[in-house]
Image: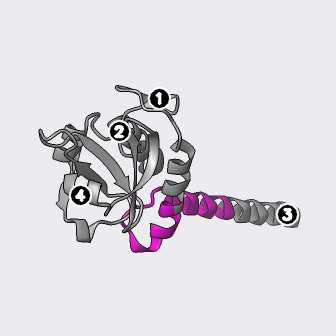
Amino acid sequence: MKFSSLLMTLLCGVMLIMTTACHTRKEITKVNHRDTKSVEPISKRLRSEVDAWVGSPYRYGGCTKQGTDCSGFVQAVYESVYGIKLPRTSQAMYAFTNPVKLEQLQIGDLVFFDYEGKGVSHVGICLDEKYFAHASTSKGVVISELRSAWHLKRFVRGGRILSNKKRT
């Protein structure tokens, strides 16, 4: 009887440890990208994912590292880092986000530009207060200065995905 009682206690202890470990792991994978406690790990993941794309060539309609346009790049990175499926075009992403002023941008916010003089025609991802990542038609995926004179002249607004925004 003592052996079976000891065995049962040991099994219960192992099950408790496994259950606790699984619970902790589940919480870590469900990190909210706007939670201030989790900004650092998410920003590192975002930067790592962006770095993996830098140098990918531009291809209109593309969404892979072999060739991508601006919205394909943003869509792929956002899904990989945040697990959020964004609409496919820069105009649809613009409509999908809540407005954010230039001074209020946070890591991971989208940045929208009017490159053609016809409204939103370009999208990128804010990396910090100075830089954003995007797919340039001439250079492919690059990191550019957000507040350069050229980009500021064409900046429309930032956009933030909030939990109350659901894709239809």
- Residue 10 marker: none
Residue 162 at least partly seen: no
Residue 95 belongs to magenta span: no
Q: Say which label, 3 or 4, has the lower sequence index.
A: 3
Color style of the picture: one colour
* Mark 1 or mark 3, whichever is nearer to me: 1
Q: Tell me the residue that label 3 is attached to.
A: 1
Classify mark 3: residues with Cα within 10 Å, few (<14), some (14-19) or many (20+): few
Q: Tell me the residue that label 1 is attached to.
A: 67
> Which amino acid type corresponds to the residue marked 3 in the rendered image?
Met
- In this rendering, position of residue 152 left or right of residue 125: left
Classify mark 2: residues with Cα within 10 Å, few (<14), some (14-19) or many (20+): many
Q: Say which label, 2 or 3, has the lower sequence index.
A: 3
Q: CA distance from mark 2 to mark 4?
A: 15 Å
Q: Tell me the residue that label 2 is attached to.
A: 70
> Which amino acid type corresponds to the residue marked 1 in the rendered image?
Gly
Residue 29 belongs to magenta span: yes
> Which amino acid type corresponds to the residue marked 4 in the rendered image?
Gly
* Mark 2 or mark 3, whichever is nearer to me: 2
- Residue 158 marker: 4
Q: Say which label, 4 or 1, has the lower sequence index.
A: 1
What residue span does the magenta drawing correspond to?
16-43
User: Quick one: which residue is furthest to the front in this view?
Assistant: 149
What percent of the width, then of the height, locates residue 110? Answer: 30, 53
Which picture quadrant has residue 77?
top left
Which picture quadrant has residue 76?
top left
Looking at the figure, which quarter contains the C terminus?
top left
Classify mark 4: residues with Cα within 10 Å, few (<14), some (14-19) or many (20+): many
